[in-house]
Every structure is written in C-alpha cells, then in structure tokens.
Image: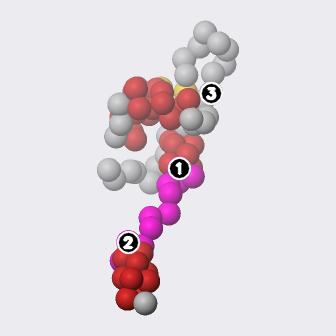
Amino acid sequence: MQRSHVMPGFLSLTDAAGWAGVSPRTLRRWIGRGLPTYQANPRSKVLIRPSDIELFLTRQQAEQPDLNAMVEEVFASVRR
C-alpha cells in the first residue's frame, strides 16, 4: 500500500486500520502486542498515530534468512 508523505496526527481505530491496509481486528491484535494507543480517559475513543504503526511494523520485521546460503552450506557438509 502506498502511503502519503503527509501524516495525519491521530486516527481512530477504524481509520488507522484503513490507513494501514488491515482490518480493525488485526489492528487490535497489534495493540495487544504493543502498538501504542492514546486516550484522554478510559471511556474516550482510542486514537493511533500512523507513525507509531510504521515504527511498530519496522520493529516486528524479522530478518529474512538467506535460503540459498543455507542450502549451499548443507550441500557442502554432505560432500565432505
């Protein structure tokens, strides 16, 4: 999903999910895993900053293994 370079300050849960291209249910799971939210009080609307979503997703990304190197390593050990 292409994101605009203009970042709105805060979005509702539904709007933030649309901005991120995921369902509100997925966004709630991310909140459970540490995505920060903002509320004036416990009864007020949950707000989320798009910049927090980007930071959260960046931190969640795992380094992709180099499968070709792994296969070559296994073949090299078998040839010995």
Q: Residue at the location (66% across, 19% down)?
A: 40
Q: CA distance from mark 3 to mark 2?
A: 41 Å
Circle number at residue 60: 1
Q: Is label 3 or label 1 in front? A: 1
Q: Is residue 55 above or below residue 18?
A: below
Mark 3 lies on residue: 38
Please tell me whether residue 68 belongs to the stretch shown in magenta: yes
Q: Amino acid at mark 2?
A: Leu
Q: Disc 3 or 2, which lies upstream in sequence? A: 3
What's the residue at 43%, 90% (across, down)?
80
The numbered mark, 1 or 2, whose residue comes first in the sequence reads 1
Residue type beneath disc 1: Gln
Q: Position of residue 36 (x, y in %)?
A: 61, 34
The reply, left or right, for residue 60 in relation to residue 75 is right
Query: Residue at the location (48% across, 27% down)?
Result: 28
User: CA gap, disc 1 to disc 2?
Assistant: 20 Å
Of circles 1 and 2, the one toward us is 2
Residue 39 appears in which quarter of the rendering? top right
Q: Is residue 22 toward the left or the right of residue 47 in the image?
A: left
User: Which is nearer the eye, 8 or 36?
Assistant: 36
